[in-house]
Amino acid sequence: MMAAQQIRERSERVRRRFDQAEALLVTDLSNIRWLTGFTGSNGWALLTPDETVLVTDGRYGGQATAQRAEAGGEGRVIVGLSGAAMLDSLAAEAGTFGSIAFESAHVTYEQFQRFQSILKTTLVPVGGLVEAERRTKDEGEIARMAEACRIADGALADVLANTGLEGRTEAQIRNALEIRMRELGASGPSYETIVATGPINAARPHHRPTDTLIEPGHTVIIDVGALYDGYHSDMTRTFFIGEPTPLQQELYEVVLEAQKAGVAAVESGLSTAELDAVCRTAITAAGYGERFSHGTGHGVGLLIHEDPFINRTGDMKLQVGDVVTVEPGVYREGFGGIRVEDLVVVTASGCRVLTASPKDSPCPPSPPTT
Amino acid sequence: MMAAQQIRERSERVRRRFDQAEALLVTDLSNIRWLTGFTGSNGWALLTPDETVLVTDGRYGGQATAQRAEAGGEGRVIVGLSGAAMLDSLAAEAGTFGSIAFESAHVTYEQFQRFQSILKTTLVPVGGLVEAERRTKDEGEIARMAEACRIADGALADVLANTGLEGRTEAQIRNALEIRMRELGASGPSYETIVATGPINAARPHHRPTDTLIEPGHTVIIDVGALYDGYHSDMTRTFFIGEPTPLQQELYEVVLEAQKAGVAAVESGLSTAELDAVCRTAITAAGYGERFSHGTGHGVGLLIHEDPFINRTGDMKLQVGDVVTVEPGVYREGFGGIRVEDLVVVTASGCRVLTASPKDSPCPPSPPTT
């Protein structure tokens, strides 16, 4: 049995962080899920001093009540049969408060105008309030993410052993990975699996798989994660097809050493810019700094990309309970690309790596003999 | 070969609709894809009188240039290596215009504040400008959606014939459908496939599949679509396990007749509220109006839910080239639920139904004999 999540404490954690207004209107669906357990595609949560009221539409009434109860949460669920009815219900609740904070990073300009015209209360913009608590994963969340990592590790190992890379297309490998993750218990892929092969495609960090054949001489980037009970995993490995060239070998070692240095540096209190610098300095010292064209990593949880973001301008400090990727890479059209990525959870003594696929050698196991 | 999309005309179509400002800042990723062919997860398009400039980050430079060229589009691609650098690049472009319109339904309150502080120009909120053109699908888009429907039809037929429903779990059927869609050419499911069985789960219109067993006496709602080259399909069928009860049979006929009446009513010029009323009136006349707890349908395209939305308060008129669902349903906890949904394209003479799975009988084919 997976460790329970501490749903009931979460509203309280947010309340303690919050004195900008009398209540907080939560509109981001991941924040709503985290606070209430509700997974529907439409809803608002109003966090008052006494309860967390959930407003949703007619498709989700029964589901919202049941999911909240299953998650161990409490509070009223109000169903509006149209968007206008939902807004009226929200206005009735909001009217008892002199001021309500809203999530300025999620409410659109248009939504803000609508809220302002209908809610008879002062609206106060706040940024990242729920996210600031949500980034700290509890035991139940970490267990779910560890399971998602285990599924992706297993799928990658099975596809390398049973399908092989050479002679397959990028799309075939993506399909095989996503199907195997499902068989191993994932509710889906964590994001569209990246399989990027050869001098052009592997040079694009977020390449979308095509019918390009994986051929000798290629580097192949596989970036794969599983979704498990709402939580994501994220991992990248790079493979060579056939004997690597000296340049491929050199670049792999540069990226791998930078990635290992990054993982070794992870500790509570380190700033995200400092962690980025650890990987970037190593790659720059080897002469490839300008080929590392993205940030070092990002938080992962109910979203595949969430706080803390780890890049040159990152000004957050790592905290115990953060789950983040460490994923330096180098890319050049005509050469291809190399990226190595692990998912780690920040602990009191450094970090624990949740992804377990081998990374010391970039060569895939021999293709299946069938 | 799939019909080409008319990328180059699209910016021109939007320009003709638009006189609120000197240029248009497009921030919604689906709108950006539609205008430029670019599929990355981060970018802005600035539609000026002369070109459509694409601004993205270091992960996507090569991809953005290549995808635009492949799609037959043109215009500069500007790469910023960080969010701040992207914003600086945008500011440099924007500075030459006295006013710029922004997408008020997509720009968040926080983003608006940031744009306002950095772009040295007047910002003008506009709503749904690109969407107003994007809802009209061209031949290439309709061909992609027809192919997505064909894939989902094939997967459903194969799973019914080869796996069967009775004795399987909801999650097993979801997995089988999603795997089969991949095998038939989908790049993924169009949304998380809904398989909802029995008196509790099938009563939730957007139920997420669980390990609940599909058993005799159940109604089973299967809502499944494929994603094909960026375009979605959407279809629902309801099945009975074993001999239907008189109530199940009656409700199926009520929903099916309402759905057929809705499809028959689709024509250019009909308002979305009128189309909703066709289905709703039929179900209300049978005494189950309050059990039809959602709208009649929605547009489908690059998004699974997009304009025009078809519900009681809908004030859009259907147009030739709209692709919409018609999907009435009735639900009650303790009974379960029934929904029948097709995807149709509005034509000069009514509509063409893109989904082809049988719907006249709710009983699945006999389970496989293996």
Image (cartoon, coloured by chain):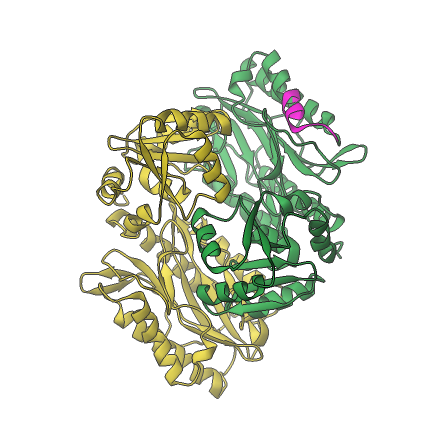
Chain colours: A green, B yellow
One can see residue B310 in this view? yes
Please tell me which residue is depicted at 30% across the width and 71% down the height of the picture.
B274
Q: Is residue B310 magenta?
A: no
Figure check: B62 above or below A56 = above
Judging depth in this view, the residue of B2 and A121 nearest the camera is A121
Q: What is the residue that sits farthest to the right in this orientation? A: A349
Residue A133 appears left or right of A350? left
Rendered location of residue B330, percent (x, y) = 46, 76
Question: Which of the 4 quarters of the picture holds residue A94?
Answer: bottom right
Tell whether position A277 is magenta: yes
Residue A242 in the image, given as x and y percentages of width and height: 54, 24
Front residue of A349 and A150: A349
Q: Which range of residues does the magenta coloring cover? A: A269-278
Residue ranking furthest to the left: B348
Q: Looking at the image, is B199 positioned above or below residue B233?
A: below
Residue at 39 percent of width and 46 percent of height: B230
Residue occupying image coordinates x 53% and y 34%: A165
Q: Main secondary structure of the magenta part?
A: helix
Q: How many marks?
A: 0
Q: Quadrant of the C terminus of chain B?
A: bottom right
| Image quadrant in which the N terminus of chain B is located | top left
Which is nearer the eye, B91 or A309?
A: B91
Query: Picture coordinates of residue A304 (x, y %)?
Result: 58, 42
